[in-house]
Amino acid sequence: MSEIRLSAGDVAPDFTLTSDTGDQVTLADLRGHKVILYFYPAAMTPGCTTQACDFTDSLESLRAAGYEVLGVSPDQPAKLATFRERDSLGFPLLSDPDRRVLAAYGAFGDKKLYGRTVQGVIRSTFVIDEEGKVEVAHYNVKATGHVAKLRRELGLAS
């Protein structure tokens, strides 16, 4: 499997995915907005829950700075709806069961898990500008502390 890695200045691959509410979300429809797009392995797991709750806790200040947040995993919309409701998440969760969007962003491939190399979701975050270009691309991020680090990088630290 070839490793795709996006960098600042690249055009963000467009997509249409089904959200936790059953709506279709298309990246191109968000032109004119800054988007934080993050990929996570599985809804309702400890690390993914920590990360999603951190984004929710920062959502007001992120939105005030003009950012929309979208989370993407291979989970089905019904599981994402349960996750969003269970943890009172304040942003759309998108379903990518065939991993096409994950692959387009380089967020699926070989990763280390307990010392072994396995195929899976690579926890990754992208900041996409108003014109649809990648502003920030982070791969292999840590679930804990990542949102605070991203806020500092975007000049939003409190």
Image (cartoon, rainbow, N blue to C red):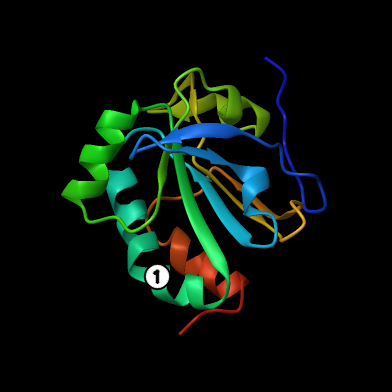
- State the residue in front, 58 or 139: 58
Q: Which residue is mark 1?
A: 58
When the figure is inspected, residue 138 is found, relative to residue 153, above or below; the finding is above
Give the x, y percent position of residue 35.
Answer: 59, 57
When the figure is inspected, residue 117 is found, relative to residue 26, above or below; the finding is above
- State the residue in front, 19 or 11: 19
On the image, which quarter does residue 79 sit in? top left
Outermost residue, left direction?
A: 86
On the image, which quarter does residue 78 sit in? top left
User: As drawn, is 133 to the left or to the right of 152?
Assistant: right
Numbered disc 1: secondary structure: helix
Outermost residue, bottom direction?
A: 158
Mark 1: few/some/many CA within 10 Å (<14, 14-19, 20+): some
Q: Evaluate whether residue 54 shows in this view.
A: yes
Q: Amino acid at mark 1?
A: Ser
When the figure is inspected, residue 109 is found, relative to residue 38, above or below; the finding is above
Residue at 56% in and 56% down: 36
